Amino acid sequence: MRISGRSLRRMVLAACALAGMLSPAIAAGPASIEPVEISARPINQFHIGHDDRKFGPLEFVGGLEMTSPSRDFGALSAFRFLKPGGDFIGVADTGFWFFGTVTHDADKRPSGIQNFRMQQMVDQSGQPIERKWEVDAEGLAVKDGIATVGFERNQRVAQFRIDPDKMKAPFKELDYLVPARELRQNRGFETVTHANPYGQHEGGLVVVSEKSLDKAGNIYAAIIEGPNKGVFTVKRNGDFDITDGAFLPDGDLLLLERSFSMAGGVKMRLRRIYGESVEKGAVADGPVLLEADMGYQIDNMEGLDVWTRDDGAQMVSLMSDDNHSILQRNLYLEFILHED
């Protein structure tokens, strides 16, 4: 039976997302910051072939499809802005840090990526870590010059001092409270984020696993800092898994979710979790804001951050992980989140 190119891409994309392992061997050599050439093709339509820009409370601003001749570029798992909508830091699940800057045009649409650099993660002696299972970085939070990273396989939450010129080994590992036996090997903490500094958790760290389920089928999570530390769960809604999240200014938790199947390919979803349900012993839940399939400009969406634009707009930025597959893409997307 003849398989169309679109169907083949769907099948392979779903398989790649499921496996999450189609990445090249980590490059050998010293762990120095290496400039990476990035080409960025503008994306002007989120719904392919349609000019609509409003999708529920979200308004599509624009996006970029990023490519590079560098063999290390890709597998972008999580990112956070160091300057709102501009300079960013991120982690790749192949064990790399990455840094860069999103540029915008006169209409405030993303126009390119500048000054992109990558550096391999290192051990305590400063040597590059070659074993991927030790540096499968998936989640990232940033505060006061400290990067907190969630790792899968060798499950841990570790903290690093941010130095864009030379990232070093972690200086601390944190107690993530969820019993280690409950964390599935490749379904660990994909969300690492700081709560609202003025809310009940006083800016403490919150971690949410991708798909480590309790007996009720809900997703393990924990508040691991602040005055109300403890384990909670997030209600699993359909066949979606959690890939990232960030707190909104009002205290709600915005989660990025992903689903995939051989038949339907990859889907993405944004869900707004009520902030008051994020507490010890609770089952946190909230409404879906956006759902998109492969009729939209999406891929294996894994990274999310929220920020405030200079005109006061509440922004949501997303990034995809291409698994180093020629059939997948590294995307950057921007939306305005309207509250009315």
Image (cartoon, rainbow, N blue to C red):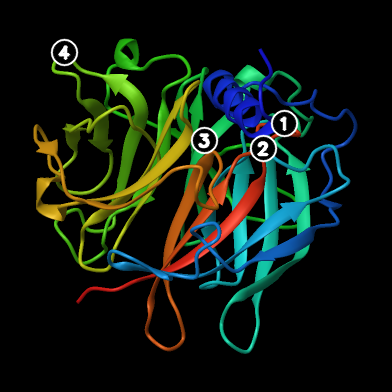
Numbered disc 2: secondary structure: loop
Q: Are marks 2 and 1 in contact (CB under 8 Å)?
A: yes
According to the picture, the residue beneath numbered tag 1 turns out to be 325
Residue count near mark 4 (Cα–Cα under 10 Å), binned few <14, some 14–19, many ≥20? few
CA distance for labels 2 and 1: 5 Å
SS of the residue under disc 3: strand
Q: CA distance from mark 2 to mark 3?
A: 18 Å
The residue labelled by disc 2 is 328
Q: How many marks?
A: 4
Inspect this view and state whether residue 168 appears.
no
Q: Amino acid at mark 2?
A: Gln
Q: Amino acid at mark 3?
A: Glu
Mark earlier in primary sequence (1, 3): 3
SS for dot 1:
loop
Above/below status of 157 relative to 331: above
Residue visible at 71% across and 18% down in the picture: 131
Residue 45 appears left or right of 214: right
Tag in front: 1 or 3: 1
Disc 1 marks which amino acid?
Ser
* Closest to the observer, 214 or 260: 260
The residue under the point 11% across, 46% down is 277
Sequence order check, earlier mark of 2 and 3: 3
Residue that carries the numbered disc 3 in the rendered image: 138
Task: Point out the residue furthest to the front here.
Answer: 1
Mark 3 to mark 4 CA distance (whole Å): 24 Å
**What's the amino acid at mark 4?**
Lys
Q: CA distance from mark 4 to mark 1?
A: 35 Å
The residue sitting at 60% across, 28% down in the picture is: 7
Above or below 53: residue 272? above
Q: CA distance from mark 4 to mark 2?
A: 34 Å
Q: Is residue 25 above or below residue 275?
A: above
Residue 228: give x, y in percent of width and height: 14, 44
